[in-house]
Image: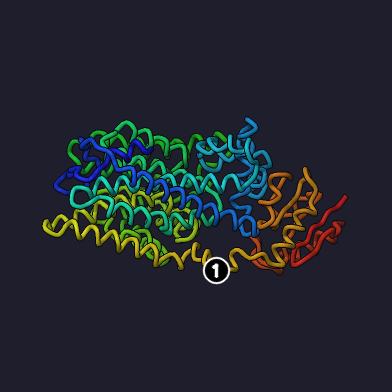
């Protein structure tokens, strides 16, 4: 990684298509970043990883992490660590697939197997949270290198690269991915940033390898690869590889969705969210071509979609729209914004925008350079000013997203509820089958066979319930209380009750 970005230096002239810093310039001048930059970028990367891990681990320790999706991944990767298929009993039972459900039938994410050896060191959800923190932080050097190499054509590259890298590290798509426990999205920024930076450096083979690795992160990453192909189609010399990426990326997504996921016990149409266009891909595509107005209407229905689109581009002050690289955003964003189901897909919260954040920043850098090139005598100062405004924007947005909690004492505080949660978890014996409330499940997952306490009675001999606050998947505390009352009528007895937590068992 260091070798990749250490080749960039001030004085590299990387113009392409008439604009400085264009994607895939190639033929870079040979050179080496000063040792101070190596130390500076390394320090920024380590600090970001520590900050992400702090947030995640405090969230876990204070029982604010959830069964969905942290326990799902914890169970699956524990299975990988035991050289077994990645089974999540919690996911399978809750969603009606059965206790032996393999998560590759939910999402095509074999890259998760790379984390299995970490469970030989420490077996538990905290391992995933720290691993995610490191993976997300490791994308920072590639973003720094991209900004440095691109802007060195018009100014001292580090004066752009550092503020952009810090802004990226604090950007809301990254921090929201950290805040929503753990997901396969942890791999996406690193691989995407590596693909873009290696392509910019003229290392096409390394870029291709990073792009192909994305196909192992999630079934729809082929759409991101197809989007990158659209970018290459804008360059005459890259049209053939661009066409191959477009076709190959779409094909990879179809293969993963229609063949691989069903092979592992899932259903090809399980996440189909485009019923307003048609019941399947063929009819939805015909609808889109014959009635394009409906596509436009869907992008603003509900209006929250437009807000998310604005927020996606806001971290780079909308400069991404000035770059051909912005074309890479179209397939993955359309996938989310045309959906009529799964509202989580189009909200700013959660981890979904982390899949494209590296593209947003790379396109923003290139777009800012293209805009500045219209003012040759002032381009360097304009790009530096843009970078500082990007950093200021990132800092200004922090309080409005999850990381704002880092500045409040209540985020770290232990309360009567958290102490009671710890005692409730301790009341459940090792090795038993337990239905656990979402907030308690991550603490129980390493040492019990954990199911989600939901609206369907599972008959487990132990239940760790929460009637003190609404807990997924219930829609009210009243329904949670009713479930506990039902358990009592069925012969369960209470072995622990405090601050809203109730642990029950039956012979």
In the displayed structure, does residue 5 sit left or right of residue 169?
left
At a point 49% along the width and 62% down the height, the residue shown is 403
Residue 173 horizontal/vertical position (percent)? 43, 56
Which residue bears the numbered disc 1?
408
At a point 46% along the width and 41% down the height, the residue shown is 219
Residue 389 appears in the picture as rendered? yes
Residue 115 horizontal/vertical position (percent)? 55, 38
Residue 350 horizontal/vertical position (percent)? 50, 57
Closer to us: 364 or 152: 152
Residue 29 found in image quarter: top left
Residue 138 horizontal/vertical position (percent)? 43, 44
Residue 246 appears in the picture as rendered? no
Q: Residues within 10 Å of mark 1 (few under 14, many from 20)?
A: few
Residue placed farthest to the front in the image?
A: 35
In the displayed structure, does residue 293 sit left or right of residue 260?
left
At a point 69% along the width and 44% down the height, the residue shown is 446
């Amino acid at each position: 990684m260091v070798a990749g970005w250490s080749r960039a230096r001030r004085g590299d002239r990387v113009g392409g298509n008439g604009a400085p810093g264009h994607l895939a310039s190639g033929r870079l001048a040979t050179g080496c970043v000063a040792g101070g930059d190596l130390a500076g970028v390394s320090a920024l990367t380590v600090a970001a990883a520590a900050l992400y891990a702090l947030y995640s681990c405090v969230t876990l320790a204070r029982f604010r992490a959830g069964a969905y999706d942290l326990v799902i991944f914890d169970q699956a990767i524990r299975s990988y660590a035991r050289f077994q298929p990645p089974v999540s009993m919690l996911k399978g039972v809750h969603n009606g697939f059965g206790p032996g459900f393999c998560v590759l039938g939910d999402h095509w994410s074999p890259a998760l197997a790379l984390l299995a050896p970490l469970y030989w060191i420490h077996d538990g959800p905290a391992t995933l949270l720290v691993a995610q923190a490191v993976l997300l932080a490791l994308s920072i050097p590639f973003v720094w290198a991209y900004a440095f190499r691109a802007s060195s054509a018009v100014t001292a590259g580090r004066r752009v690269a550092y503020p952009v890298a810090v802004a990226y590290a604090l950007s809301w798509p990254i921090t929201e991915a950290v805040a929503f426990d753990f997901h396969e999205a942890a791999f996406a920024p690193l691989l995407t940033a590596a693909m873009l930076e290696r392509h910019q450096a003229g290392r096409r083979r390394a870029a291709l390898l990073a792009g192909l690795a994305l196909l192992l992160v999630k079934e729809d990453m082929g759409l991101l690869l197809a989007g990158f192909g659209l970018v290459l189609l804008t360059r005459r010399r890259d049209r053939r590889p661009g066409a191959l990426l477009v076709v190959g990326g779409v094909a990879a997504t179809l293969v993963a969705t229609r063949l691989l996921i069903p092979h592992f016990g899932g259903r090809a149409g399980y996440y189909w969210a485009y019923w307003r266009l048609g019941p399947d891909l063929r009819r939805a595509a015909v609808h889109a071509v014959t009635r394009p107005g409906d596509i436009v209407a869907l992008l603003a229905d509900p209006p929250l979609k437009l807000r998310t689109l604005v927020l996606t581009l806001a971290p780079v002050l909308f400069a991404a729209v000035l770059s051909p690289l912005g074309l890479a955003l179209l397939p993955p964003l359309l996938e989310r914004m045309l959906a009529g189901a799964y509202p989580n897909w189009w909200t700013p919260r959660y981890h979904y925008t982390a899949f494209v954040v590296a593209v947003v920043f790379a396109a923003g850098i290139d777009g800012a350079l293209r805009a500045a090139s219209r003012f040759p005598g002032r381009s360097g100062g304009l790009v530096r000013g843009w970078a500082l405004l990007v950093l200021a924007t990132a800092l200004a947005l922090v309080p409005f997203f999850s990381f704002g909690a880092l500045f409040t004492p209540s985020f770290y505080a232990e309360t009567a509820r958290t102490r009671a949660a710890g005692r409730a978890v301790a009341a459940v014996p090792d090795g038993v089958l337990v239905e656990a409330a979402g907030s308690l499940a991550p603490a129980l997952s390493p040492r019990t066979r954990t199911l989600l306490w939901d609206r369907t009675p599972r008959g487990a001999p132990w239940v760790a319930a929460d009637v003190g606050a609404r807990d997924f998947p219930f829609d009210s505390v009243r329904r949670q209380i009713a479930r506990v009352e039902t358990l009592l009528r069925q012969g369960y007895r209470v072995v622990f009750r405090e601050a809203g937590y109730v642990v029950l068992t039956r012979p």
